[in-house]
Structure formats: C-alpha cells, structure tokens
Amino acid sequence: MQVKIGLETHVQLNSKSKIFCGCRNPATMKEEPEPNTLTCPTCLGLPGSKPRFNRAVLDIALRIALALNCNIQPAVMFSRKTYFYPDLAKNYQITQYEVPVGKDGHLEIVAPNGKKRIRIRRIHMEEDPAKLVHSGSFVLVDYNRSGTPLAEIVTEPDFSSPEEARLFLQGLETILEYLQAYDPDTKAVFKSDANISLAGGERVEVKNITGTKEIEKALKYEMVRQANALRQGLSIERSTVAWNPDLGVTQMLREKESEEDYGYIFDPDLVPIDVTQAMLAQAKHGMPELPHQKYARFVKQYGISQKLAEALVAELEIASLFEQAAGKAKPAIAATFIAGDLKKTLNWNELRYRSSGLKDEWILYIVEQIERGKLTDRNAEMAARRMVEEKRHPKDVIKEHGLESATLDLQSVLKPIVEQNAKAVEDYRKGEKKAFEFLVGQAMRATKGTVQPEQIRKELEKLLK
Ligand code: ZN
Ligand code: MN
C-alpha cells in the first residue's frame, strides 16, 4: 500500500516566561497551576495591551533550527493569523507565516530498511492560545496557556509508513531534550498533526496526536480506513479528522479550509528583528553534543556496539550515567547493563531514568559488582528489578534477596558432579560438546545462578583435563 505522510509538530518551549509578555510560562511547571493565575493584559488580549517579544524564545528556536540543519532566515517577523475561536481572545494568533525562523532542513532516522533523510520544510515560532475546559453544560476558559511559546516543526511528506513517523518523533523529542528546549518531565506538550494520503485519494489531516506513542496507532488506523474506503469505490476527500486516543479511532471534524482563508497580515505591533551574527554565535555556543554525535563518539571511544550506543543516547541522563559507569568498569559491562536490564526494567514500569527516583550511585554500584564478579548477569537483572520497584540501594536489595555471588570453592562443587556423572564425562572426553554443557547445567543448578557460566566452564575444563 503506497502511503505518504507529513508531520506538523507543536512543542511548548521551556523559556522562563511566555513569548509576548512577562508572565510565567506554564510549560516549565511540574504541576498544573490554578486556572487564570498566570495572566496579564497582554496574554488576556485586553485592548491597549501590546506584545513584546521574548528574545529567550528566539535563542531556543535558533538552536532547534540549527540542530535540524535549517537555513536560518535573516529576519524574525511575526504575522497575525485571524480566526474566531473562544480560546483566542484577540481573534488572531501571533505566528510566523511568510518568514519562518528556519527553512529547508533535515533529520536522519534509522528506518527498518536503513538510514533515511526526512526533509524539514520549516520551523516557526508562535503563541499557544488559551485552553477551553468543558465542565458539565459550561465551557470555561483558562488563559494560563495563552502566550505559551511554541515551535512548530513541519516536515515534507517524506514518511512512507506510520513506523517511520514514530521514529522521527522519537528522534526529534530526544534532540529537543538535549537542546533543553523541551522537558518531558514537565507539563510541556509535544503534539502532532499528520497529513496522510494513499495513492488514489486526497490528503487527510489527522489532528491532535499527543506524544510519540500514539502516532503510529493513529496513522495505522487512518491508513486502513482510507484503504477500505478506496477498495469499496468510495472517494477520500480533502478533510480534517481528529484522533480519539480513548476510542482508538479518527473522527471527522470538517472539510479542510486553506491557509489563505486565515487572511494573514504582518503584525504591526512587532517590528522585524535582524538575526545578527552575534545572535547566531550565541545559539551555536549553546549547542550541546547532539544525539547522533554522541552515538558516534560512544562507538569510537568506548568500542561498544552500535545497538547499545543507540539505546544509551536515546535519553540524555542515561547517556551521562553510562559515561560515569564506563569510568569505573569495562565500558562493555556498563553499556550492557544500563542499555539492557536497567532500560528494560524502566520501560516495563513506564519510567524515564531521570524521574524514576533512582540514584546514579546505585547503578554504579551494580555495575561495579558485575565487574568484580560479585553479581551474575541473571542476578544483576533481578537486582535492577527490585531496585526500581522498591527504590532502594541495591546493596540492601542484593543482601536481602541473597543475590550476591557466593565466595564458594567451585572445585568442591564440581568434583561430586563429575563423580556422579561418569557417563557424561566419558562422552565429553570422546568429544561430545553436549555432554559438557550438561555438566555446566548441573553446576549452575547446584550454585543457584550465583556463579557466571563462563567461570563454571573454565573451572570444569581445568578439572577434566
Ligand atoms: Zn501575560
Ligand atoms: Mn501552529
């Protein structure tokens, strides 16, 4: 099935204050503030109030545009996008239309059939409108959100599957986190609209897909819906639908209006600002090492596999945790535990490392224990699970659950096994590998998983010589 998908993603940026006034930016908060407590005449759209552009938002937007390889436009200009909606007090949204901050960029994703370059059409800044709160037979307006800074990132229709769209959003979210443009542990919203068309049908816009988890589901649903309609000889008209995550379906909103219908005009309250060399230099100076750069460095510097490196850089705090651990133990051991058991356990509990309540020193402790042979891989996994669930120092967890490798005399365990399994020993001496593995299995059972299999193999070989 031939499908074309493009994305428009809105992300609330984490500048301290809003984009056109000095009110505190609710996107930086961990708790939802009381309604209508973060407002002033400007973000309430009162007559006589004037917007003033917050340069901190430009600095963030420039970093995003640079990270996505965009051409930076020489001037910042704002326009009014006029429409009526009860959450829009001024009846227009201040946005960038004719001249976005960045144009013609790209981001590379690792799709199932190889690397793929997704073109970025544009990145622009705009204000978020207020929020409607539906309450019984009333609709209330909360103006806290009004004036929250947004970056809108628009791709070309370069995705040929819902999975590619998800991989792109995951990559984008990681970059935004690295840039400190967006903090997933706050109330900040990361939301996408998708354009999707099948060969033989018109383009349908799917609104309101939150985060990175829903995108694949929403697009798969829409793909099947359109394919079924086309198969039955129905036509797919240009339209807008909304994704309903609770029902797992898309629902018709309206026939699509065109951009021209919004009657854009340049906003006379906001004069153009030149993007100077000094501003660009500052943005470049604030650029951190990006995920793909960190990935390449990890593979080279630590000699770990591409797969492990990829898993480590997907979360900034995990990447820096790994670098600490790699200073204390063999990088391969640190990478395998952190990208493997630790991440698996966090994912299972739907936690991100940063907000999990775990401490770096706890993870470092486990890695050191593995390195020193005090913890087998299997018991390290157990320790990780208990540590995440009980939020306790692994030292206590390991002691309490008896996970530590016994300091036993392996030979005294192996000798009786060899004596009691004369047939297997004989087969092994005849060159049967299976017989050796059988003896290893017996020894592992006897030591209850507290000894690494490699160690058992080594000792057993010695004994049988
Ligand atoms: Zn305000
Ligand atoms: Mn927008």
Image: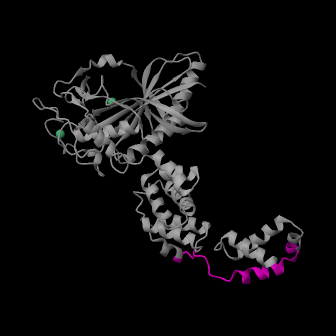
Can residue 79 be seen by looking at this rendering?
A: yes
Task: Indicate left or right for 48 with 37 as reference.
Answer: left
Residue in view at x 54 percent, y 34 percent: 116
Where ligand 2 lies, by image quadrant? top left
**405 relative to 48 in the view: left or right:** right
Q: Does 408 lie within the magenta span?
A: yes
Residue 348, above or below 12: below
Between 67 and 460, which is closer to the camera in this rendering? 67
Residue shown at the point (36%, 18%) measured from the top left: 257
Residue 170: percent from the left, percent from the top? 47, 42
Q: Position of residue 21 (x, y in %)?
A: 18, 39
Direction from residue 366 to residue 207 in the image, left or right: left
Which residue is depicted at the point 24% across and 48% down?
A: 33
Relative to 417, is 64 above or below? above
Quadrant (top left, top right, bottom left, bottom right) of the C terminus: bottom right
Q: Quadrant of the N terminus?
A: top right
Corner quadrant of residue 451: bottom right
* Magenta segment main secondary structure: helix
Q: Which residues are magenta?
A: 399-425
